[in-house]
């Protein structure tokens, strides 16, 4: 009962912090996929991405008439509650292992786990309101897989942990590194960094569970053969992905893809690593030091491992949330060291963790503001297009039913004044061909059908053109009941 009370208290504290961090996304907002999702008649698309739990729940929601875009505030709260739950579960697990009576140490553990869920990468999960429910499942099951692997014994340990991990993978594959990183971190802490046979055996257990779950996922994906994002095991593809990932490291450590102050996180992470390395080398043996280095390398590599076998490498923030789990794990390791060896630096560690949480929170607000502003610009752009369509319909007595779209020669993916934009974050809804006409339908209440762009229309009016603002006379061409639009 006492442990349950502590869990609830930690959960409530986490809800408060995460509500403060992500609460702004309880208002209506939209991703590139939201408009298409609003008109979704089946969840078959999720089969192409091997998100089988996503498919099952999505199918049930459609059957029950629950539109995920319409009910996004409810599912956003579910994500906040879920992230708070995994924060509480991890906090209490690490607390039970470190078993410190110092309040500051317990606070450091909690802050360390908060960093793993309140950050500028996981933020993108909130920017896709139609999928927040499935991100919730992915994260909760990943952490439950950790606890099952740590707390259970015998065959039950493997079966239960693997089952939870598969449910996580069937929701969203990017949560797999979260499982691996926290599990191996727990093993390091519980074994006091010592490279004992028990520690090595337990580490291999977690790696085995993660590997088995991944193999099962790939095999099922191959059998289902839904024509989607199948794994590509070609050696040339893997080598090319490795090259891209190595180049990517500069941007991710420099300023978190433009979402953090330059070099601040790099500096803080280096300090954490130095503290860990010095203390482990000082208080353990060479074997333990090498074991620590190996685990840290595995934890960092696993963040990007799923990208090695993807056909088309797309390193959007939502796919590398494990990066912040890695940073969180460094904070947890330092907290253990502070409690065991270096009480004198705990104040500075506390300040560093608060700084991390604070910077993430401020930048989440900034990015969120830009996201909502970009949505408003989409709505205004569509209103201008609709006004031109209605003028034509009124003047010619024709009802427009079809829309064909294209982009000008130097299409601007981001509106002027939108500062925080990278990959799919805060870009125009017209960036993707599945989001432009559905967005028009969403805001106008019409039922336009998307058709192919007429080549003669394109060559005559749009080819080689480049606009910097909306011009209805030049960017919109009418022909019968069809309108041809070139987005600037």
Image (cartoon, grey):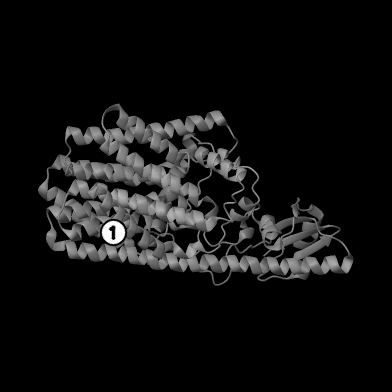
Q: Which residue is mark 1?
A: 111
Position in image of residue 164 (x %, y %): 39, 37
Left or right: where does residue 433 sit relative to residue 15?
A: right
Q: How many marks?
A: 1
Whether residue 260 is visible here, answered yes or no, is: no
Q: Residue at x 78, y 62 (%)?
A: 461
Position in image of residue 342 (x %, y %): 13, 57
Image quadrant where one finds the C terminus: bottom right
Callout 1 crowding tier (Cα within 10 Å): few <14, some 14–19, many ≥20: many
Whether residue 89 is visible here, answered yes or no, is: yes
Does 343 sit above or below residue 40?
below
Left or right: where does residue 29 sit relative to residue 305?
A: right
Q: Residue at x 39, y 53 (%)?
A: 83
Q: Furthest-front residue in view?
A: 1
Q: Residue at x 21, y 54 (%)?
A: 334
Position in image of residue 9 (x %, y %): 29, 56
In this rendered view, identify the residue nearer to me: 485 or 80.
Answer: 80
Q: Furthest-right residue in view?
A: 397
> Dot 1: what SS?
helix
In this rendered view, identify the residue nearer to me: 337 or 412.
Answer: 337
In this rendered view, identify the residue nearer to me: 134 or 1.
Answer: 1
Q: Residue at x 31, y 52 (%)?
A: 88
Q: Quadrant of residue 189?
A: top left
Left or right: where does residue 115 sit relative to residue 365?
A: left
Position in image of residue 421 (x %, y %): 51, 63
Left or right: where does residue 92 sit relative to residue 346?
A: right
């Amino acid at each position: 009962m006492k442990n349950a009370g502590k869990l609830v208290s930690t959960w409530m504290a986490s809800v408060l912090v995460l509500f403060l961090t992500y609460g702004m996304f309880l208002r209506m907002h939209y991703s590139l996929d939201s408009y298409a999702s609003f008109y979704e008649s089946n969840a078959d698309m999720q089969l192409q991405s091997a998100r089988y739990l996503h498919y099952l729940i999505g199918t049930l929601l459609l059957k029950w008439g629950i539109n995920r875009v319409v009910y996004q505030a409810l599912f956003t709260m579910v994500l906040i509650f879920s992230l708070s739950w995994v924060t509480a579960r991890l906090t209490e697990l690490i607390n039970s292992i470190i078993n410190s009576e110092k309040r500051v140490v317990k606070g450091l553990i909690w802050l360390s786990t908060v960093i793993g869920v309140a950050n500028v990468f996981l933020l993108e999960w909130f920017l896709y309101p139609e999928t927040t429910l499935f991100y919730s499942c992915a994260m909760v099951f990943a952490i439950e897989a950790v606890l099952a692997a740590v707390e259970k014994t015998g065959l039950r340990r493997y079966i239960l942990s693997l089952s939870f991990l598969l449910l996580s993978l069937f929701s969203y594959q990017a949560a797999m590194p979260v499982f691996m990183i926290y599990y191996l971190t727990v093993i390091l802490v519980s074994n006091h960094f010592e490279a004992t046979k028990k520690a090595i055996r337990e580490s291999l257990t977690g790696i085995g569970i993660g590997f088995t779950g991944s193999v099962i996922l790939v095999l099922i994906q191959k059998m289902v053969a839904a024509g989607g994002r199948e794994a590509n095991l070609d050696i040339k593809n893997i080598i090319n992905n490795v090259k891209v990932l190595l180049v990517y490291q500069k941007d991710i450590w420099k300023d978190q893809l433009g979402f953090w102050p330059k070099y601040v996180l790099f500096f803080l992470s280096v300090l954490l690593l130095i503290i860990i390395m010095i203390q482990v080398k000082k208080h353990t043996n060479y074997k333990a030091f090498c074991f620590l280095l190996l685990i840290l390398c595995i934890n960092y590599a696993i963040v990007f491992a799923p990208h090695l076998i993807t056909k088309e490498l797309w390193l959007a923030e939502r796919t590398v949330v494990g990066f912040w789990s890695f940073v969180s794990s460094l904070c947890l390791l330092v907290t253990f060291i502070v409690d065991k060896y270096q009480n004198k630096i705990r104040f500075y560690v506390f300040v560093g963790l608060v700084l991390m949480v604070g910077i993430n929170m401020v930048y989440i607000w900034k990015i969120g503001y830009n996201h909502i502003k970009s949505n408003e610009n989409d709505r205004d752009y569509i209103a201008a297009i609709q006004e031109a369509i209605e003028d034509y319909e009124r003047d010619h007595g024709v009802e427009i039913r079809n829309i064909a779209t294209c982009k000008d020669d130097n299409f601007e993916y981001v509106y002027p004044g939108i500062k925080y934009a990278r990959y799919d974050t805060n870009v125009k809804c017209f960036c993707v061909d599945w989001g432009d006409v559905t967005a028009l339908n969403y805001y106008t209440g019409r039922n336009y059908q998307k058709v192919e762009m007429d080549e003669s229309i394109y060559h005559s009016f749009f080819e080689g053109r480049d606009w910097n603002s909306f011009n209805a006379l030049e960017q919109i061409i009418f022909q019968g009941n069809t309108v041809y639009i070139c987005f600037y």
